[in-house]
Image (cartoon, rainbow, N blue to C red):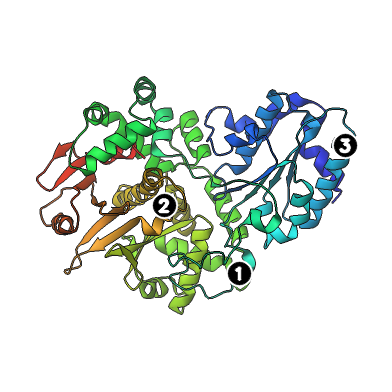
Amino acid sequence: MDVPIDVRRLNPWWDDPAAVDGDEDIVRWMPTKYTPDTLDDVAHESDGAVYVLRGMRLVGKTTLIKIMIKRLLENGVPPLHILYYESDQPESIQEAADYHARMANGSPAAGRRYLFLDGAASIPKWTERIGDVLRAARDSIVTVSGYANEIGYADEAGMRIPDFRRIVSPPAGSRKGVHARLGVRRGRDVVLTPMSFFESAVRIDKEIGEFARSTSMFSPQGRRDIFGKLIRHEIDGRLEELAGYKRQLDRALDVYLSTGGMPHAIAGYIRKGLSWDPLYETHLDRMREAWDVPRRDPDLFVRFGRWMASYEDNLVSWDKLAKGTGITPPQMVLNYANLLERLFVLHILYRHKDGQPDTSAAKKIFFTDPAYLHMFRYSADPWSLPAPLYVPDHRDKVLEGVVATHLMRLARFMTGGEGFDPRRSIFYWTDKKSRPVDFVLDLGGDVRVPMKVQTGHVSRRDMSALTRFLNQTEYGGLLLGMGDLGEQRDYLTVPASVFLMLA
């Protein structure tokens, strides 16, 4: 590979700043006009810093980087001061950075430099292997992206991962952060997630979009106030106004359950409605590449995903998973599950026990986005997902997963996000008769809110575990389903589509 030629090809704005508008990622992004604020600080940094951007494959990391480059060019940053490079080879990254330094040094323009190293954070032990690049760029703004959490290095995948690995906090100072190890200034370590239901709904339905723009209820303080009243068994008048759009919101939720929150999926729906897209097959191929790690068989990851997608419940033990997938012993299944969580494919939740995760009980496992569930179902049976993609007999399962991911957003928002760990904030619970409470939102102190997700008829027996859990908290419970907004003695009923707009 001729790195200089590769660099020139990837940075066409060096010759013509307007060329960024013809970039294929920018062209695909234009119809959505969806830009998360994850990297907004980059354009306003006064000092050098390193930003680490992570997220699942195809969630839009590369597109977001290209949008930032477009903004920098529009704000007058000299084109030669911006390097974009994509590689999983440390040597080529070093060569590309050296070439860019020579080019920028020869430029008469002054000012800060920006390096966007796309995919570099997916290199095993990337901070060590490209550390020289980052240290040499100490006065620059560097953004490094990757598709796995920092602790999910590929060469760590052969380790035996204990069940409590991410629950028991490591001793203070036992692990230095990326920036401390490199001696560079910290920017932000952020995870790019799929679009929320709110972000999708305002684009899917014009009426919802117009309403959202006309009210302050979706401001940070508005959401906080409305949710605060809900858990105190009160219904805010603004929530009643939102419930007036229930028909449109339910329709938008059906689309979301079908497409998930991937920006390209929502854009595809807006252009052509619900239809099967071969992108799912491409997505699975790319995930296999991500799972090609030492002592791990990518096909076993696919087997794991297929079984989870077809299993009728989200609650499962490691033993049952081992038997269902044929991946033995159970410890091996645990390793696969933990690695898939680090790759942003799964979320694993624990049973609530006296304010702590009960690691001995069965786990609730959810896909991080409905697209994954559909993808794995399609990989098992290509004829299983004709248009529209959504299959009614999986409605509760898919909806419960969407509620889980949105509760994580909500908990992160309500707690301020610093050091947030979803395994310490989102749980499930069962009573002595093994009757479930689908979720317990634990915001610290005595704020523990039980929730039930059910789209069909709800009987008193269905709610018995939730009402029993209320003996442990002074806060009210919530039933999230397809019914109307209303008040019961022990809990409030809130349409799932209305509740998800708050997260």
Q: Which mark is residue 424?
A: none
Indicate left or right for 468 with 114 as reference: left
Rounded to the nearest whole Å, what is the CA distance between mark 3 and mark 2?
57 Å
Rounded to the nearest whole Å, what is the CA distance between mark 1 and mark 2?
36 Å
Q: Is residue 120 visible?
A: yes
At horizontal 31% and vertical 71% (from top left) the residue drawn is 361
Q: Secondary structure at mark 2?
A: loop
Q: Is residue 498 visible?
A: no
Looking at marks 1 and 2 on the same chain, the residue that comes earlier in the sequence is marked by 1
Measured as percent of width and height from the top left, residue 319 is found at 37, 75
Front disc: 1 or 2: 1
At horizontal 26% and vertical 51% (from top left) the residue drawn is 447
Measured as percent of width and height from the top left, residue 86 is found at 72, 47
Is there a contact, CB below 8 Å, between mark 3 and mark 2? no
Q: Secondary structure at mark 1?
A: helix
Residue under pointer 3: 105
Looking at marks 3 and 2 on the same chain, the residue that comes earlier in the sequence is marked by 3
Question: Is 491 rendered above or below residue 344?
Answer: above
Q: Quadrant of the C terminus?
A: top left
The amino acid on which the numbered mark 1 sits, given as a three-letter code, is: Glu
Q: Residues within 10 Å of mark 3 (few under 14, many from 20)?
A: few
Question: Is 340 rendered above or below residue 395?
Answer: below
Looking at marks 3 and 1 on the same chain, the residue that comes earlier in the sequence is marked by 3
At horizontal 49% and vertical 75% (from top left) the residue drawn is 332
Question: Is 356 rendered above or below residue 453?
Answer: below
Q: Nearer the viewer, residue 29 or 39?
A: 39
Q: Nearer the viewer, residue 97 or 355?
A: 355
Rounded to the nearest whole Å, what is the CA distance between mark 3 and mark 1?
39 Å
Residue under pointer 1: 156
Residue under pointer 2: 384
At horizontal 47% and vertical 30% (from top left) the residue drawn is 270
Indicate left or right for 238 with 299 as reference: left
